[in-house]
Amino acid sequence: MNSDNFDPRSLVRSFWEQGYLVIHDFFPEHVMAEADREIRSYFGDDPAYRHEEAFLARSKTEVIPWFPQNPEMPDYLPEVAGVFDSLEQDSRLVDLTGAILGDAWSPLYSMVMFSRKGTVGQAWHQDCPPEDSSRFNLNRLVYTRSLSPDDGGEVVVIPCSHRKGMLPTGETHEDLENQVVISPRVGTLVMLHGHTWHRVTPIKSDFRFSTNFRACPQGTPENITDICVYRNMLYRFSTAEVIEER
């Protein structure tokens, strides 16, 4: 969908039917260029991984996170945070988020996810356990660069899987029936339900990144994304441990 067809009511209906939304050209290119410069400046050419090797090997998820809006981080800079604040405070994004999540929704945090060339991307996962359908996070993914099949790093989702319960066990990166491959371009916004089954394809270009402005409905605990569901395990980030083998 293109931002020229921005109709919040139909977008909300589509989100709850499919478990995700894709809106191309949501943000203008000049706004994306500013955020893109800050991200590239922060990561440089060869950033180091921060997760333990055991997690990287088991999860088949190779990303390096950055939390540019978090003042508690040692690399926090107000002027850089302001660039990301302006994206998150876009009135159309705020209104669409409220239409999806309802009144008194809360922002969680923003996270830039960087992947290096030749890495596997992100295996099939759910951002939070789906036992309680009312407790979930909302991913609001913003892309400052275009991604094509030649670049890799595309987002793959299973439509309607936010209503299908736990991600089934199996191979971590295999193609699944009815999967949809999303190729974001500059300014694309992807809204993704935290229970939706999704992955990111291997990285073929020099690097790949996206910015995730996470949010949640009223009454959702702030640590809703602490436990991630993979096809081979449940992993708790706060304690860096596998809490269930699958």
Image (spheres, rainbow, N blue to C red):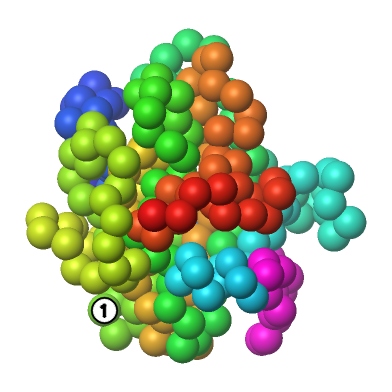
Q: Residue furthest left?
A: 178
Tell me if residue 49 is in the magenta stretch.
Answer: yes
Q: Is residue 60 above or below residue 113?
A: below
Q: Classify mark 1: helix, strand or loop.
A: loop
Horizontal placement of 144 versus 22: left or right?
right
Q: Is residue 166 above or below residue 147?
A: above
- Residue at x 64%, y 61% (from the top left corner): 65
Mark count = 1
In this rendered view, identify the residue nearer to me: 75 or 96: 75
- Residue at x 40%, y 60% (from the top left corner): 232
Q: Which residues are magenta?
A: 36-52
Label 1 crowd bin: few (<14), some (14–19), many (20+), radius 10 Å: some
Q: Is residue 8 above or below residue 85?
A: above
| Quarter of the image where one finds residue 52 | bottom right
Horizontal placement of 173 versus 106: left or right?
left
- Residue at x 39%, y 65% (from the top left corner): 123
Q: Amino acid at mark 1?
A: Pro
Q: Position of residue 104 (x, y in %)?
A: 54, 13
Q: Residue furthest right?
A: 74
